[in-house]
Amino acid sequence: MSGIHGARSALAVVLLVVPAAVAADTRWSLDGGAWARPRSGQAVLSMQPVASAVRAWSDAATAEIVIRYPGGEDGVLWASELRDWLVSLGVPSAHVRPVAGGEPGSLRLEVRPRGGGRA
């Protein structure tokens, strides 16, 4: 199991293993320290905030994952990289929306109805 196929298999495992109870929570924080480690599809999915957000997204028929990122070039790059990982792992790009205005040093992942709610 390697490459993108291994990562997609890991996504399937995460969706089965992450408890359904997290679906009640719709916000998670991913700090810069966790993100600074070397990344692969499996490593990204092993990050609890990412796994929980993907699980909540998959449980909702018309949901999107909002990535709130800190301002500046570093925040934009971080959010873009996470968005790219989510898309490569099977979350449709139309269901992932980066939004500026997060707190320094972390990304906040939110799952909400697509096109609804405030940005």
Image (cartoon, rainbow, N blue to C red):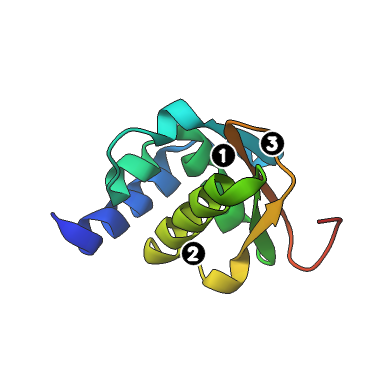
Q: In which quarter of the image is the C terminus?
A: bottom right
Q: Say if 98 sits above or below 102 in the image.
A: below
Residue pictured at 71% horizontal, 51% vertical = 100
Q: Which residue lies furthest to the top in this view?
A: 33
Q: How many labels does the image show?
A: 3
Q: Mark 3, mark 1: which one is toward the viewer?
A: 3
Cα distance between the residues tagged 1 and 2:
18 Å
- Amino acid type, residue under disc 1 in the picture: Ala
Which is nearer the N-term, disc 1 or disc 2?
Answer: 1
Which is nearer the N-term, disc 2 or disc 3?
Answer: 3
Which is nearer the N-term, disc 3 or disc 1?
Answer: 1
Q: Mark 1, mark 2: which one is toward the viewer?
A: 2
- In terms of image quadrants, where is residue 21? top right
Query: Residue 71, which numbered label?
Result: none
- Percent coordinates x, y for residue 11 in the rendering: 36, 52
Asked whether 19 or 76 is in front, the reply is 76
Mark 1 — residue? 20
Using residue 14 as the reference point, say whether residue 31 is left or right of it: right
Helix, strand or loop status at disc 3: loop
Q: Say if 62 sits above or below 80 in the image.
A: below
Using residue 1 as the reference point, say whether residue 61 is left or right of it: right
Mark 2 — residue? 91
Residue pictured at 83% horizontal, 63% vertical = 116
Cα distance between the residues tagged 3 and 1:
10 Å
Using residue 103 as the reference point, say whether residue 118 is left or right of it: right
Residue pictured at 47% horizontal, 37% vertical = 18
Mark 3 — residue? 25
Are there few (<14), some (14-19), or many (20+) residues within 10 Å of tag 3?
few
Helix, strand or loop status at disc 1: helix
- Percent coordinates x, y for residue 23 in the rendering: 64, 42
